[in-house]
Amino acid sequence: MNTATFSLLTILPAIPEIALLLLVCGVLLLDLFVSERDKHVTFWLAVGSALGVAGLTAATLGNPSVVTFGGLFVADPMSQVLKIGALVAVAMTFIYGRRYLEDRGLMRGEFFSLALFATLGMLVMISANHFLTLYLGLELLALSLYAMVALQRDSARATEAAMKYFVLGALASGMLLYGMSMLYGSTGSLELNRVADAIMRQQANETLAAFGLVFIVAGIAFKLGAVPFHMWVPDIYHGASTPATLFIASAPKIAAFAFVMRLLAHGMEGMIAEWQPMLVMLAVASLALGNLVAIAQTNIKRMLAYSTISHMGFLLLGILSASQIGYSAGMFYVLTYTLTTLGAFGVILLLARSGFEAEELEDFRGLNQRSRWHAFVMLLVVFSLAGIPPTVGFFAKLTVLQAAFDAGFAWLVVFAVLMSVIGAFYYLRVVKLMYMDAPVGEMPLVMRGDARVLLSANAVAVLILGILPAPLLNLCARAIAGSF
Amino acid sequence: MTGFPMLSLVTWLPIAFGLLVLAFGTDKNPTPARWLALVGSVLGFLVSIPLWTGFDLTAGGAMQFREFAPWIPLFNIHYHLGVDGISMPLIVLNSFMTVLVVIAHWEVITEKVSQYLAAFLIMSGLINGTFAALDAILFYVFFEAMLIPMFLIIGVWGGPNRVYAAVKFFLYTLLGSLLMLASFIYLYQQTNGSFEILDYHKLPLTLTAQVLVFLAMFASFAVKVPMWPVHTWLPDAHVEAPTGGSVILAAITLKIGGYGFLRFNMPIAPDASSALSGLVIGLSLVAVVYIGLVALVQSDMKKLIAYSSIAHMGFVTLGFFLFNQDGVLGGLIQMVSHGFVSAAMFLCVGVLYDRVHSRQIADYGGVANTMPVFAAFFVLFAMANAGLPATSGFVGEFLVILGALKVSFWYAIAAGTTLILGAAYSLWMVRRVLYGEIANPNVAALKDVNARELTFLVLLAIGVLGLGIYPRPLSDVMVPTVMQLLDHVTTSKL
């Protein structure tokens, strides 16, 4: 599999990435010839690219794991499922964000081409089998995201957020690279399979590898936004324009999950005993801080940022179980979390209108009186985030808790459970504002028909997956079983 | 095992009607939603009757009307329903109460009517599912999902302090139930991957494990019952909830706590249950005596009934943890009886509140002069609340005291005080509200009950008296299950 000969068979597994690259370039070029009024052409091209590549990936579902490009790239069942998830999330982000972007003059080709480049970065990360590919994908994603945040250039808040994101992100990337270089020094390879082999056979320099691991875990924690590397999350969520926030909050989480799986569950499988306690600490801190601080927020974007931090704590519970059950629980968690977050931001974008952001909690006041259905959508989404059945959030929590219990972390399960009671409080506050308070203004809700339909479908999916989670759970379990 | 999926129908029919009401109800013209809800609730009650008539009394406590289908094969979770002599009467009771709640709301709720009715119908189905579920996760899903409509009912249609009460209710119950979830995960591991409640019953556990499982589940169900000292959410929730909410809370959701003790705590952890029975009995007696005294000094009628509910539920838990047939059977009958009586009391207060918009006892006086028919019913229900013979309240209390006497004379004495305290607070309230001079112009202007109100009062009166005079049909259903349960819990798992 490590032959350097180049043939069609070599590139076949990477067809989705290659197709996306061509499509992005196409979008970038075509956009030059599209007038300001007709930006919806670019928009539909971008949506079509994301969905088309998702369809292309879906055609490969069920194929066994293939390593190609001399060990740089892997297309395995896990990557197929995660890629489809990420691509669909990106397309949904575009549709939700369109009206907001139009209202604020942000409906430009750059937004879509940057977003698609970021998506390409995610796909590369998901399929990486080599430290360099991982890093390449990560940087493509991160650089595009910095620019996306900064795109709103006359907003001081967005610029500040982009600056913070860039500086902190660069620091984290540096740490990651430093850790990778140590592992290279210790194992003599950058390819994940070989690194894993070397560690398993105890041919690696253990001290050096352990040091490398610490840096890598720090880099991972930054990308996930786990405490104590979470500082950027609330500021970026708050500062970026809402569609950019939605973009950052959704698909990249799926990519980050793949990133963690590749590095820890695959590359450093032999060092579980070392990284497990580190993840335990990250999970405990994230669960505690995320939930407690979210209570004090009055801005819903900041609140969701802290809620993300606590959800990453839950995700880590699945990963740190270091078992097939745990990994597939984590995968289920990240996919359903993304779906739910899309719904939450979808409602925020629904409430926003030109010159008005609708990002304070107060703006949700009396939503039930303004639109019963959209209040119900938000209700489902919020209860799913809180993990209350019959929404999908419950099964996501149940599976990770069960995995953590199986791995012997009973105390951690009890701790997580107590923290989610605290978490329920601030989610309830949103419901309270929507249902139990009178509306402040009677402004009509403006949203495009397609976005409304999608938002409804999104909420119904949260409910249906909560009642019938078996297909998705099986899909995740099979994907993990076929990949690890 | 095969046959018509009766329990699914009982569970999903009200939910389907709830969704229909939500979909077709508009705020401007609530009448169609009201009739649709009435049809749904009556149908829901009608389909629950075959559970009673088709119940096999000779089955000896085995689960009946079972339905079994894979739900989440990966985790061995099943859609498994079934009822025994404990859960079946509670399902029928719940379906009956839903009809009353729909009748009771008619002229009272004028805002967001369709959402109100949909919340009740959906909740009714979820409660039936909770009682019928034989899979721990299925049970948990129903049990928790119930919180959402209840939270909205209290928070949207409740009194002035409703938000505080709703949030308190939600968080208290959530904390308990999540701990229970953790114990389910533990049991899943111990049984090598089963979420079947009946498998848990057979699972041998060490005493330490039993105690931990017992406490985790106790946290959940004690909050639900509610037992002293975790009862503080109840008076708040009751006082702020609309009448229908109070009825369902008192008549049904509190019973889920009692049901949980019988279905989970006692059979899964029998040794821990007997080791800790002293604690539970102690807490129950505190509820009976202390909360009884607290009820005595209330100036708000709903609060008074709420505290009296806690005291009566103390009786139920006392009966259960005596571990003899009289006690458990008495506790069960008391649960059903309290369902009727507390519902009736809350509806009576609702009748007054709709006219005067006050729950304060001091705002009334001499109501019997202007509302004689209502007064007759109110007195009857207050008597039943006090446990007067020939009312349903008497049967359960008598059996529990009898059971307590077999265990300890002092338990029986302490439990017996309820007869005095119950009479004191119920009758004293009746005297201050109904009798005496007409205290103020509000009371003078009162009109007696209308046909709609008469309907639910008569239905409840039939229940209260029927159960009090001839409890045999109920006890016949319960006794085999109780015998089997006691057989099981008195056998050590160690």
Image: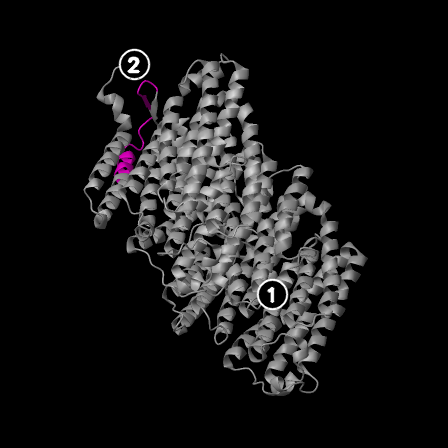
Front-most of B222 and A226? A226
- Type of amino acid under label 1: His
Any part of residue B253 in sight: yes
Q: Residue at x 36, y 29 (%)?
A: A137
| For discs 2 and 1, the disc positioned in front in the rendered view | 2
Q: Which mark is residue B238?
A: 1
* Residue farthest along the left direction in this orientation: A33
Q: Dot 2: few (<14), some (14–19), or many (≥20) neighbours within 10 Å? A: few
Which portion, as a residue range, is magenta? A52-71
Any part of residue A326 in sight: no
The residue that mark 2 highlights is A3
The percent position of residue B479, horizontal first and vertical second, equals 62, 57
Classify residue B59 as left or right of residue A333: right
* Magenta stretch: includes residue A69: yes
Classify residue B65 as left or right of residue B233: left
* Magenta stretch: includes residue B364: no
Pinpoint the chain carrying mark 1: B
